[in-house]
Amino acid sequence: MYRAIAISFFTNKNVTTPDLFEGTYRFINASEYEIGIPIAGSPCSYTITPSLSINKTGVLISPTYPGENDGIHIRGSECDQKILSKKESTGYVLSPNYPYPYIPKTVCRYFIYGMQDAQHLERVRLEFTAFNIPKVEHKDRSESNCTDGYLKIYLKGQETADAYDKFDYELCGNETQRVVSDGPRLAMVFSSGELQGRGFKGKYTFETEYKIPGTAAPDGSCSFTYVSASKKRGELNSPRYPSNYPSDTNCSYLFLAETNEQVTIVFDHFKIKADGNPNVTAGAYGSINCFEDWLEMYVVYRDNNDRFLGRYCGMTAPGPVESPRGAVGLRITLHTDQENVASGFKARYFFETAKSEIGDCGGNFSNEDSGIITSPNYPAGYKAPGRGMASMACNWIMTARPGYKLSIHFEHFSLEGDPANRGCSAAVLRLWVNVDSDQPPLELCGEKPPIEQWHYISTGQTARISFTTSDKTVGAQGFRIIWTEIQDSGPGPPSIGLLCESTYHFQCEVGYCISDKLRCDGVKNCGPGDDSITKAPAEDHGVLIITTLLVVSFLICLLCTLYHSRRKRRHQLRQLGLHRNPHYDSQTSATGLSSSRRHLQSGGASIAGSLHGINSGNLIIPPAPLPPTSVPPQPPHICISGSSLDLTPGAGYPGIMINDGLDDLELDDDDDDDDIQPDIFINDVRFDEESLQHVQQLENV
């Protein structure tokens, strides 16, 4: 109030805490506050004499003006105030002279402004705790009742253009109202009429403006909920998109579907800061690469448990995702640290009728040795979902028997997308090597180079593959995946040199043990770079030669027997003078073939007879050498015209086929020089006529 201010600081002698307070001071011109002649004995009384004053008009102010509530008086105005945010601060705005009645015929303006800069954007929330401005009732309901005194509120920054006639609210009477500004600005104009009232008291709150569509949390945090019952489809985005999102922020987006529904999310723009990792230049996926700013996705279940889907940053956009059947919905979280920002993301959501467990296509496989998974319409190329559909999903679930794992080999892979530059926003394949684990799936798109080998081993009995396309899909060739059940050797991948548990398994060169039934099926079930399943195994050559001679001898004897039997029967018929009878010939042929077939099916007896016949001749067969003790020798594997001959001891030698079966063997009675030329394959090597003659020569030695 005078020319000096004294500040006294008192402290306990034991207090040594530094930096208790600091402030600034400024000297100002006292003439602005001298409104008359001070009266002696009073600290704030003045005498105003017009004859002694140069100005015939003036203002009256309180002694410590402008220290008035939280606002700053706007110099040159009667009672205008400006209230600025101190970052998410709160305070009160009052009518003049509150809580006492206001003075009639007064106009005051209030400008309440939140923060707005590169890192901050706020909005203003205003709620009145007291309000009393008398109103006048009019018979004409179209006429405003606030014709004497009123309070007009502006939420869109109209005051910056002096558009005070375009107000959002006009209040009078005893109304209480809660309003939120569209941006960082809220303005009010109070005009008191001839009727006197108590005025108003309003609480203002500066909140961070996220500019996110959705139902915001009541506490003003960056949490938004999307419920199917309210809206079936819409958009979501990072705070302030397309402007940069703020730093040091955590946002949550929760999508809740109905019982018979699922939710799909498709990303259209994605750019999350990842510049703290020098190895990440464009895109990133996973917690190893994304440790500054990131976006995470979860599947939400009814027991309040969330299943982690993945973490994303850089420009690696998440692929389209559908909530699985039985889930409540999906949840997205965005985390930003205190340094640097980016433009964020924009996405769309769709609530649709729930699909089956396998989706639009796919399958559930168990108790099978192997299988092939291809994208729809492969290799012609997959297409976009049908008209009106937000997405298309194919789910495959493979379950191995107890004690087994799964080998998954990507033989060909070509999906639209670029993980390094734009991610997998149009189409994506997700691979879970263990569906019971909390680990996120592997997320794939783009094209696999021919020189790269994509091969994965499940960590448990079950693996899952999901292929999802969106309404922005263009299409590509797709993929072909070979999965095979392999013998489990304990934790980790199967070790090389593992002994297969039985002769019913085939050991690949890389050490995997797979079903022996998978031989000769043309599929590389041993994985990339291992052709051992499709070629002759490295075995003891002595055993192989002996076995080969035995089999060839048996086949030659069989053919000779059939041939001579035919000639003998034909000769007997001619001697009896019988004429050709088609019915008789067909019956005889059938009988002869049936007999031959029974001869083949006798199995071990036929082989034993062949052995006896050979040993009784000049051919001396040395005893087979003992197999190595490290790895038991596998039985010879013989394919005859695409069929497999199992020479495992005790197997009975079933499945010998000549020219795809004896049912197709034709012997012409009119031709005495019938030449039967069977197609014989031994260990995937074809034996032609010259080879058989060579074997016969060996037999005669």
Image (spheres, helix red, strand yellow):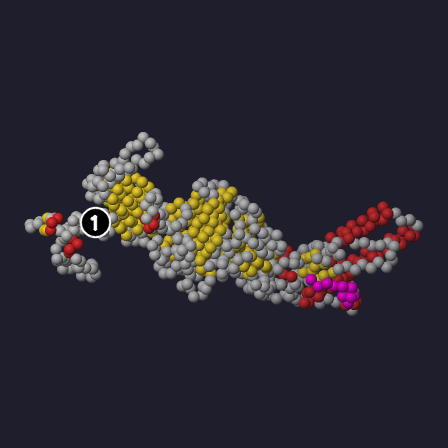
Residue 529 picture quarter: bottom right
278 up-or-down from 64: above or below: below
In the rendered structure, the answer to whether residue 55 lies left or right of residue 116 reads left
Q: Is residue 279 above or below residue 365?
A: below
Task: Give the crowd class for mark 1: few <14, some 14-19, many >=20 residues within 10 Å.
Answer: few
- In the rendered image, residue 690 lying in the magenta stretch gets the answer yes
Q: Which residue is at the far bottom?
A: 701
Q: Nearer the viewer, residue 563 or 429?
A: 429
Q: Position of residue 336 (x, y in %)?
A: 38, 57
Question: Relative to residue 116, is residue 195 drawn left or right?
Answer: left
- Quadrant in the picture for residue 619: bottom right
Mark 1 = which residue? 68
Q: Amino acid at mark 1?
A: Glu
* Count of picture labels: 1
Quadrant of the rendered image containing residue 231: top left
Where is residue 228 shown, x and y percent of the image?
45, 42
Relative to 642, is 514 on the left or the right? left
Does the magenta-highlighted stretch encompass residue 620?
A: no
Q: Secondary structure at mark 1?
A: loop
Instruction: From the top left corner, tell me how far across and down residue 124 is, in percent.
Output: 32, 48
Seen from this angle, which residue lies furthest top? Answer: 139
Which residues are the magenta region?
Answer: 684-695
Query: Does residue 297 sit above or below 700 in this rendering?
Result: above
Q: Is residue 693 left or right of residue 498?
A: right
